[in-house]
Image (cartoon, rainbow, N blue to C red):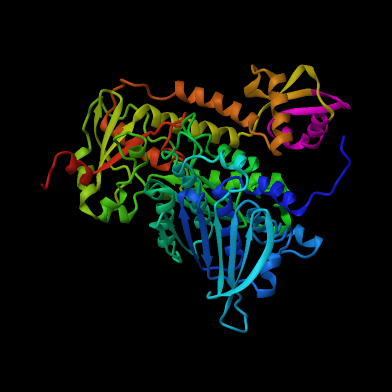
Amino acid sequence: MNRINRLNPRLANQIAAGEVVERPASVLKELLENSLDAGALRVDIDVEQGGKKLLRVRDDGSGIHRDDLALALSRHATSKISRPEDLEAIASLGFRGEALASIGSVSRLELSSRAADASSDTGWAVRAEGRQMEAALEPCQHGVGATVEVRDLFFNTPARKKFLKTERTEFGRIDDVLKRLALSRFDVQFNMRHNQRTVHELRPAATELEQRRRIGLVCGPAFQENSVQVDQRAAGLHLRGWISLPAFSRSQADLQYFYVNGRIVRDKIVSHAVRQAYQDVLYHGRHPAYVLFLELDPAAVDVNVHPTKHEVRFRDSRLVHDFLFRSLHRELADIKPEVQAADQTNPDAAQTAPERANGQNFLPLRDFRPVREAGAEYRGSMQSAPAGSTQGAPEQYARLFSGDEEAPPLGYAIAQLHGVYILAQNKDGLIIVDMHAAHERITYERFKQALREERLKRQTLLVPLSLAVSEAEAECAETHRDSLLAFGLELERVAAEAIVVRQIPALLKDADIEQLARDVLSDLLEFGASDRLENRQNELLSTMACHGSVRANRRLGIDEMNALLRDMEDTERSGQCNHGRPTWVWQSMTELDKLFLRGR
């Protein structure tokens, strides 16, 4: 073994660069975060050859004082923290003070700036080039703000350079970085050029309409048109942003942006809470899309857990998980088929649909808004009129177009197609309903409501089940004993590494109790919460609802079909069946006219 030696600054910076500078996109992330921390309201980005030849970022922030320019290129030099206590409540995006030094050690870097409080109109520039880390200071012409120019990335570390991908791939990563930061700061203008060609001109977005336009530019118009706004506060937490309608889903989790105090993060607690909120309405194997911002006390979150600052640790992860789940679950439950006045007056605004992006040719009704109404009792015994009857239809159509009363969102039934679909007409077009899927959701929600109102029934095991577990799992069972009992599962710790199952939910009497208990404890250890019990109960209720719902090929009368439509309007999550499939779709008259080339 060699003797222990202190690394020289150049080698130490290159090692640090391995943590911070993975590719050109990593450089851009660090530079943009510095610009935003400096209070910039406009950032201009120039990229050449996917960032491998040039990355230039110019901002109009507060700038850097002349005497601090050379110091800014040294390791662990920062203006953002100064005391150990500052690490406990970090409010800035960057704080380590190692980005510029790391970038400068593997590139030809030039930093130009003029501070807002400078006594002269002259800016100053400092250069650093790879192995030569000595900074040379010289005057230059520069407005208030800073410009960082990074050329020939990894020119002195060919082993790192050969791992870079093609120009198109590297620029795609750069584009993703800009999009993520642009969503976090609507008040900042971002301009980007690639190889002297303008790619983005994102103007400041002050109003909600402007913010939605930026979201459309970044996330695509399909997400913009098929999302609902979230704004919830509780326990010192504030969640705002946009979540996709259940009908708009992705084959992969590529349209998910979550920010904690303005910092984009990837966190398993957050992912689990969102997944749990969508689990009852999303088709299996699909992923929701969202742009969400969580704001909380900086002291309640630790951002100093990863070199790239992509991960955080919450002080009270259980509180955050429950808040996220309940907020999103409530918003999704409030999505009911109420047609917006804007859709009625401007049908073309509603034509961007998620299914079009998924290669399907039907359009769901969009822009549902919350309608809080008490759940109605099921109106029809499904025997109110003879099969195929049109009793009451003329009067209903007359009410639909009379304007004397508000028409229901799903309109009125006009026919049944092949014993499977209900065709209905509202003021704006045609609605097609999968009658089995719709009735299945209605029945399922009523089963869940009945279970909540009658409270959970528990069944005591005649022979308690003893389980050998780890000490951590035994402690977890003891800590969460009361909360588990509320769901019908009684776990008692009888030794340092042993527990006993004494009671289970009556609905799960035929389940594998040992596996269920172990899975619940595993979830509690990892996420601080578990939805295993509720999920298993919901699976049973879903099966019961499926068998108890109206089947395909059953002929329904007009009154029976209308009763089903009215129940759909009153039922939470009625846009999807228990398995996540859509229960109804809509096509406007404008779209129907296009199909038949009317007006041409």
Q: Is residue 289 left or right of residue 357?
A: right
Q: Is residue 242 visible?
A: no
View extreme (bottom): residue = 119
Instruction: Work out whether residue 556 or residue 441 is closer to the camera in this orientation and state it.
Output: 441
Instruction: Work out whether residue 399 or residue 172 is closer to the camera in this orientation and state it.
Output: 172
Q: Quadrant of residue 126?
A: bottom right
Q: Quadrant of the N terminus?
A: top right
Magenta stretch encompasses residue 511: no
Residue located at (46% from left, 48% from top) = 373
Residue 440 percent location from the top left of the image:
43, 28
Q: Is residue 202 visible?
A: yes
Residue located at (49% from left, 45% from top) = 170
Compared with residue 261, is residue 549 higher up or lower down, i.e. above or below?
above
Residue 348 percent location from the top left of the image:
26, 51
Q: Is residue 393 left or right of residue 40?
A: left
Span colored in magenta: 472-500
Magenta stretch encompasses residue 473: yes
Compared with residue 501, is residue 366 higher up or lower down, i.e. above or below?
below
